[in-house]
Amino acid sequence: MQGAMYIVLDLAEYLLRGCLFVYLLNGCIVPKDKWNKLTKKFTSLIVVVQFTVIRMLWNNLPALKRFLYGEKMMHVSSKASIVVIIFSMSITIFICFLLYDGSKSTILYLVFTDYTLSELTRFTLHSLFMLLMNGLIGIFNHMVRIGNDFVIRHVNECMNLIQLIWKLLFLSVFVSLFSFILKQLKKQFLMGDRKFKTTEMVFLAVPSIIGFCFVILLRSIMYSVKGNNVQFLMVDNPETYLLIPLIAALCISSILISAKILKSLVKHSEEEVILGTYQNRISDMEEHMKDVEHLYDGIRGMKHDMKNYVADLEALLYGHNAGEQLCEEEIKRYLDGLCTTVEQLDMQCNTGNPVTDVVISRKMREAQNSKIIFDCDFIFPKVLQISAFDLSIILNNSLDNAIEAAKKVEKAPYIKVSSYRKSNMFFLEVKNSFDGNLFYDPSKKVLRTIKEDTLHHGLGFKNIKNCVEKYYGSVEYHVIENEFVLSIMLQGMIEN
């Protein structure tokens, strides 16, 4: 009866442990797409069952017990439990690799940290509960000494009841504390769809490795049997009643704090990226304002000088009427110069919108100053209710990248901008020559910046992507020999 009760308690503990482990996995990693829907529904159940079955077999299967404890199947040292932990962890890692999608380092970290935190939580409570057990046994011995008839007649039953109550209390407190710790870890670990870098995973894993090494050390020296004597670490060294839970609690804290620190650092870096995005937009607006000011100053200057222009023309016409032969040529040169002055005030590209006119004209001048051939066939989609400001962000960033790439081309660098509308969809294409060096990150399926400041560079494409997603569109790029092609599609709303 007693053995059956302990088996039931062990089964309950491993089932709860398995459920808590699945709770940690859900949201951090997802089942693989190759499994059918039926398997996905039972993925969590498979993990819980394997977790429970492996531990129950190690504890109750005679063949495995002989392997661990010898022919007599007696616990002669706490070292044997290390094999159970490592074997169970290895099987769990294998099952998770098989069932779940995501980076191997993330899966390894979650499984390894779950086992480490479980053992550390156990050792945090074990010393305190050993003191509780000693207290209960002390009370029991006192009742025997004073001659309590009931206790004396039911010595074995009373001892079994004390052990059962102790195990139930330990299991309840352990599960409650362990679930709280996992909840805190998951809260810090979840960072949306963000993929962890190798250095970040190392930063997270180091406290877990230290904690696991401490667990292995304790499992090696917790107790041993020599002859008829059982040597307990805590009995021989009473100070360990305090030191073990203290160190275990510090290890747990370091694991949680490292996750919290990393999340704070990631959040700070993302805020810097957002700040950089807004700074880019402000910079674009400042450039736009400069162009408008230049245009306004030119018009004001033309207005101011208009009387002088009229007076000069009148003088030239008077000389022409007086019969001066050179006046006709002077009038022609004067008018040509006046036309040139007026043309400088006009936009180099007329798109149908003053905002995109300014943006493309500015980029066209910048390209021409760098001896880059700039061909523009862009028309603003007036009827689609697409914001000129959003299109200016897309044009600014795409043309900045195109100019930067074309500058590296020695022979006939060029940029071509074209657009067209089809129903409620607007298509924009930017082509540019480049030197053929393209840095692609296959893990994230995106272009990787070649600049040293990877945090603040690469914002251009992110800005474009943010604007495109606002209109439920798409952005793609491909390479044809030494030509880079950026294709953008936006969905607008046709005005009634």
Image: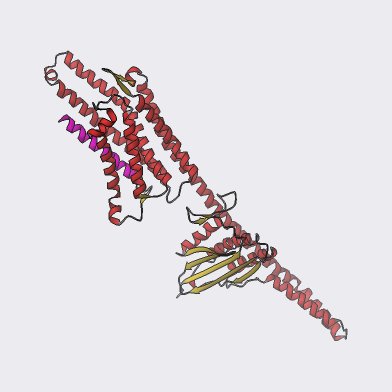
Quadrant of the image for the C terminus? bottom left
* Image coords of residue 175 (percent x, y): 29, 36
In-image side of 6 versus 289 (left or right)? left
Asked whether residue 235 is drawn in magenta, I would say no
In-image side of 294 versus 326 (left or right)? left
- Residue in front for this viewpoint, 479 or 118: 479
* Image coords of residue 338 (percent x, y): 75, 75
The answer to which quarter of the image holds residue 301 is bottom right
Q: Is residue 496 placed above or below 399 in the rendered structure?
A: below
Identified at 40% across, 27% down, the residue is 247
The answer to which quarter of the image holds residue 123 is top left
From this viewpoint, is residue 351 visible?
yes
Magenta residues? 1-23
* Image coords of residue 129 (percent x, y): 29, 26
- Residue in front for this viewpoint, 279 or 105: 105
Q: Is residue 41 placed above or below 231 in the rendered structure?
A: below
- Residue in front for this viewpoint, 71 or 481: 71
In-image side of 485 versus 151 (left or right)? right
